[in-house]
Every structure is written in C-alpha cells, then in structure tokens.
Image (cartoon, coloured by chain):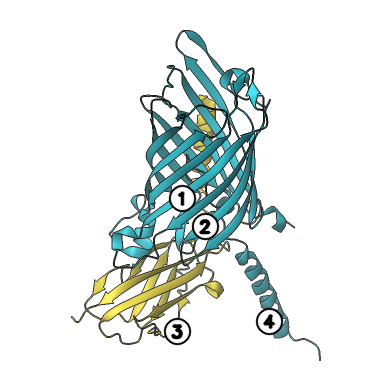
Chain colours: A cyan, B yellow
Amino acid sequence: MRPTFHDWRRAQFALAAVLMITQINNALAHGFAGERFFPATILTDDPFVADEMSLPEVSLNPPGPDGSQQTDILIDLSKRITPDTDFTISNEWRRLRAPGVPSVGGLGPLQTGAQYQLFVNGPHQALGLLGLNVTWGHTGRATVGAPDFTTLSPTFDFGKGFGDIPRSLTFLRPFAITGNLGFDFPTQATTTGVPNPNNFNYGFAFEYSFPYIQCCVKDIGLRPPFSQLIPLVEVAFTTPISRASANQTTGTIQPGIIWAGPYFQIGAEAIIPANRLTGHGYGGVVQLHFYLDDIFPRSIGRPISEWW
Amino acid sequence: MCRIISALFAGVLVIGAAPSLEAHAFLDHASPAVGSSVTAPPPLVTLWFTQDLEPAFSSVTVTSEAGQRVDLGNARILPGSPAEMQIGLKPLPPGTYLVSWHVVSVDTHPTEGTFTFEVGSG
C-alpha cells in the first residue's frame, strides 16, 4: 500500500517531534536547577557549564597596602563542548599605578579552564561542578604582575537555592548561595628567591532573587526592570597553605546587584578589602555578561558536540 | 577606549532591540496571581510568559493540598497569544492549590516553576 499524504504528514510531524525532543534534552544552559535561575556572579566562579561571555568586566581595585592601585579590563568566555562539559578562557588588561613611579599597563596572564557538571538537582535547586583552571606563565607582562610560572587550580563549585524549604517561610525561599572551594598549585616553588605558595581559595555568593519571588513565591507587583534584579553579597578569600608565614589571608567583600535580562545581564559591585593585608579604601567593578545560548540558540550557543 | 565602549554599547542596543531573538521563557505574571488569596474559586488559571511557547512541549497542572489534580486537563496556548497558557479548573473548595508548569520556548529552551494560590471561604 502506498503511503498517503496524511501518512507523510504524520511521519514529518513525528520526525520534527523527535528532533525537537533531542534538542530540548540538551538545551538547558546557564544557571538553572529546576525552577531556580542562578545568575553569573562576578567575583566567584559559577557552578554551571555555560555558553556565556563577559565583555567587558571593568574593575577599579582598592589601593593595596603599599598604596598601589590596579585597574583591570577583563574578557571571559565559557563555551560548552558537550551538555555537561565546557572550557573557559579569559584574559585581562591591567593598569598599575603606584605612588612615585610612572603607571604601567599590559596584559595579565592567560587563564583557561575545563569544567564538568557533576550534578544538577532540580527539586532541591542544587548544582555541583568540578573544574581545573590553569594560569599560564610567560603569557602576560611581568611589570603588571603576570607570573613566569604556570599555576594549576582544581576547584569544586556548588549552588543551592532555598526554594525547597517550607512554603510558609515565604520570604526566605528566594535566597540562594553559590560557592567555590579550590587550591592553587604553582609549578615553580620560587621566583627570584620569593616563594610561590600553594593557596586554599574559598568564596561564596549570597543572593536574593527578585525573579524567584515573582515567579514562585508571591507576586508583589514588581515589574521589569525591578523584577529582574538580584541583590547579592560576594566574598572570596585566599589563604597560603605552604611556603608562607602564618596569617597571610587576603580577600574581598563585594556587595552589589545584578540585573538579568533575556540575553544579557549587567552587574555592579563595590569592592571592600576584608583586611589590612588586602588593602584599604574601596573599589568597584561593573560587568556586562552575554548569554550566548539565548542569543544564538541554534548555532554557536549550542554545545560543540551538537553542531553537526 | 571611548571607541571600544561605544562599540560595546551599540552591540548591547542591537542585541536588546533585535525582535527575532528568543530566550528562556520566564513566568511574567499569572491569574490568580502567584501566592495570592482569592475569595471566589477561579474557573481557570492563566499564565503569561516572557517568550512565545512551543505548544507540544508546554504543560501546566493544578493540584490540591492532598496532591489530587483539580484541573480539567485542557491546558492550551491561546491562538494569537503564543506566550499565554490557560487551563480550566474543577469547582474548587476553600484551600491551597499548587500550580506546576513546564514550558519550552520556541527556541527549545525549557523552564519550569511552581506557585500556590489560596481560595478562601469567602
């Protein structure tokens, strides 16, 4: 029996549905765990693989203990290779001003990374990610602090939204926390006699999501752009664990806000030194961050494994 | 530097203004409103999203506190309003009801969410 027009139509519809389902299963990108959207944070690493790009992130850092002050303009790209793996690449242009000497500018070290999405738990709004970041030696200008050695930095990043706590705790449910735990292992113990310590790095972002209030807790009348705001406080610290004297921890505290739109987000944070060893005074950072998977959903915004 | 900043700003404007772009669909608002309390039992739940939806892969259910379905199973995306989804409800006694939605925007991005509303004894 020859196929009829309706048989062909049915077959076409079935094929389209199969193709659609195949794409949907792999289409979940940037920071979703169930109904929770995690924005890309500025100071701490994100606990999810993504197709995203920061272009640019501009930081005016607080003056250091010696009075020097550094300005950074950073570009950062994350690109999924498969739905659960991605690579990252970033670099920054630095300008260093120190009292009594001419300011210097130049590229910082090239940084790359490979990441694996360990788990995504939708009902509990939880994410876990393993990563290995590499800061490459001899890839930046030494006078702005680029090292002459390579550093390996394994990390574990996590995220947890509190939307799964009892619904009676209405205004606690929009809270979320993301965090990083990691180490720095320099491949060279000293540079011109100065030790390069191994470091323990830890950082957290405490977020309060207005989008989550509106979608899933209570419509309190917020409308765009206010319904798209996520106030947050980020903290990050580095503690040397070898080849350094005690009490050498440095870190910053960064309160700020992120506006998350459909295709990009804009974030701004103050930079406050956590102790005198880190610096004094205040700084600030602004970031423009694009969601490539939303801008180019059918081409470069998909994992590379799905390009063919 | 000014030229770079101008180019970036122009890029943002172009991306933000491009009408053909699509993205994840977020719940914009709902009726009954998210977390609201109503006196009269609503005959249906309507959800408005920020992006157009793919009808074949978008759904919504409404359940009672006991976990029983109280919707009519007739979820649909309205013709001419592809970002709006409706589902009819059985007559609701006073109580708290859970709305659960799973949608796929037309560019294949899936999103989901839940919220409650309360029907008073009115």
- Dot 2 and dot 4 residues touching (CB under 8 Å): no
Q: Quadrant of residue A143?
A: top right
Residue under numbered circle 1? A178
Q: Nearer the viewer, mark 4 or mark 3?
A: 3
Secondary structure of the residue carrying numbered label 2: strand
Question: Which chain's residue wears label 2?
Answer: A
> Mark 3 and mark 2: span between their CA atoms?
32 Å
The image shows residue A302, relative to residue B14, as above or below, that is below
Which three-letter amino acid code belongs to the residue tagged 1? Thr
> Mark 4 and mark 3: span between their CA atoms?
24 Å
Q: Are marks 4 and 3 on the same chain?
A: no
Question: Which chain's residue wears label 4?
Answer: A
Q: Nearer the viewer, mark 4 or mark 1?
A: 1
Q: Nearer the viewer, mark 2 or mark 4?
A: 2
Q: Earlier in the sequence, mark 4 or mark 1?
A: 4
> Mark 4 and mark 1: span between their CA atoms?
46 Å
Of the pair A206 and A260, the residue shown nearer to us: A206
Secondary structure of the residue carrying numbered label 3: loop
**Residue drawn at the location 46% of the way across and 18% of the way down:** A68
Query: Residue A127 shows which numbered tag?
Result: 2
Q: Are marks 4 and 1 on the same chain?
A: yes
- Dot 2 and dot 1 residues touching (CB under 8 Å): yes
Residue under numbered circle 4? A10
Neighbourhood count class around disc 2 (C-alpha, 10 Å): few under 14, some 14–19, many 20 upward = many
